[in-house]
Image: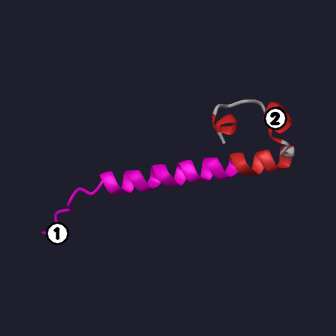
Amino acid sequence: MKLLKSGFPNEFVSENTGLSKQEILALKARLINITLSTEKASRGIFNTKKKNCNS
């Protein structure tokens, strides 16, 4: 995982882990989705201003 997160080229990661290039691309896609989900969740948690309900 450190190789993936460090931004090494797919060929380098493939040669050093034994994973196929398709497996590496799938893992990178999952990491991106996890990162995006985490960012969305943190924005939701920290943007909890109370709305004025006196309309």
Numbered circle sitting on residue 37: none
Q: Secondary structure at mark 1?
A: loop
Query: Which class describes the residues within 10 Å of circle 2: few (<14), some (14-19), or many (20+)?
Result: few
Classified by dominant secondary structure, the portion drawn in magenta counts as helix
Numbered circle sitting on residue 16: 2
Task: Pinpoint residue 39: horizontal percent, then vertical percent.
Answer: 47, 49
Question: Can you name the residue that lies furthest to the left here?
Answer: 54
Question: Can you name the residue that lies furthest to the front here?
Answer: 17
Q: Quadrant where the C terminus lies?
A: bottom left
Task: Pinpoint residue 22: horizontal percent, then vertical percent.
Answer: 84, 48
Query: Which class describes the residues within 10 Å of circle 1: few (<14), some (14-19), or many (20+)?
Result: few
> Rounded to the nearest whole Å, what is the CA distance between mark 2 and mark 1?
58 Å
Numbered circle sitting on residue 53: 1
Q: Is residue 15 left or right of residue 28?
A: right
Q: Residue at the location (63% across, 48% down)?
A: 31
Q: Residue at the location (69% across, 49% down)?
A: 29
Q: Which residues are magenta?
A: 29-55
Q: To which quarter of the image does residue 4 belong?
A: top right
